[in-house]
Amino acid sequence: MNQPNTILFLVNPFAGTGNAPNAANYAINVMQQNGYDTELLVSKDLGDLSKFTSLFKVEKICKIAVVGGDGTMFEVVNAIMQNQQWIKIPIVAFPCGTGNAFSYDTGFLTVKKATKLLLNGKVKLLDIAEVKTNGKTYWSFNSVGCGMVAHTNKLAEKLRWLGGYRYIIASLLAIISKTTIKAKVTFNDQVYDKEYCAMLACNTRYVGKAMLVAPFAKLNDGLIDFVILHKASRFKLLMLLPKMFSGKHLKSTSIKLVQTNHIKIETETPQLLNIDGEVIGNTSFEIIMFHQKLNVICEL
Ligand SMILES: [Mg+2]
């Protein structure tokens, strides 16, 4: 049987500043000039891209290009995890969103660089986290958060017109309307029952727009870098915010960083949960890190 030679482009024109279709056109041309066949699926509505697993034949596809943002990647990763025959197909993330957490981590932050990666890059197996909540399972490549980080993301979604600044403005608004979360948190055989401002379980080093929340996180060590922000004053939170872009926030006594492969967070009242930028409501949840599950092209 012939080797598969088709690259599947999954394109989200609504991501970031809307340059995904142009980026895809550029990359499709380059791939065709290099002897690849291409297939294209352009999203018209939320959830459209996750249908690719039934629209295309997996035997024909050799690579997948995800042209959009972190939300687009989340959609595609979850579709792949639910249709395991697709898990062997390597994927490339194109930086066409607002945040582009994956591209920040791998350093492929331009369309040209991502195209090179798609053409000649090496495949690596990267970690992925399973998130269980209210009987549902989600898969996270980026980060899972609750408390202020989830509120920030919900606000940022409403502020898309602000472009990249939406995360900073949303963070400031979340600090002003400061909410805390009372939770029983279990990790590394220890149980903590306290009040927190936020908790963020990171697989990537970067979160949101260029926020270096977990500077030591590695994409393939089987561990979650779990950043806990204890209850703190608005003033302290305001001082912390700019430090999150350089990783200096970790020096604060309000912040604890631990590495683990399993976190359970139980809350008495429903809380917002943020999985790779997607905000959902729930009561309690469990995060399990899986070691090297996802085929990602992320190195030249
Ligand atoms: Mg890790």
Image (cartoon, rainbow, N blue to C red):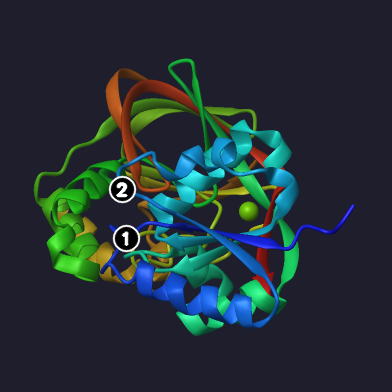
Q: Position of residue 97 (x, y in %)?
A: 35, 64
Is residue 45 among what the camera can see? yes
Residues at marks 1 and 2, CA–CA distance in whole angstroms: 8 Å
Residue type at the position of mark 2: Lys
Instruction: State whether label 1 is within 8 Å of ligand 1.
Output: no
Q: In this rendering, would 103 be left or right of 222?
A: left
User: Secondary structure beneath disc 2?
Assistant: loop
Residue type at the position of mark 1: Pro
Q: Quadrant of residue 236?
A: bottom left
From the viewer's perspective, is residue 200 above or below residue 124? above
Bin the neighbour count of mark 2 within 10 Å (Cα to Cα): few under 14, some 14-19, many 20 and up: few
Q: Say which residue appears at 66% left-offset and 49% top-offset.
A: 127
Q: Quadrant of residue 253?
A: bottom left
Do labels 1 and 2 touch, CB within 8 Å?
A: no
Considering the image in quadrants, where does the C terminus appear? bottom right
Sequence-first disc among 1 and 2: 1
Q: Position of residue 243 (x, y in %)?
A: 33, 70
The residue indicated by pointer 1 is 13
Q: Position of residue 105 (x, y in %)?
A: 54, 69
Nearer the observer, 35 or 111: 35
Q: Position of residue 56 (x, y in %)?
A: 60, 44
From the viewer's perspective, is residue 267 above or below residue 299? above
Q: Quadrant of residue 182?
A: top left
Residue 44's disc number: 2
Q: Say which residue appears at 61% left-offset and 76% top-offset.
A: 32
Q: In this rendering, would 281 be left or right of 155?
A: right
Instruction: State whether label 2 is within 8 Å of ligand 1.
Output: no
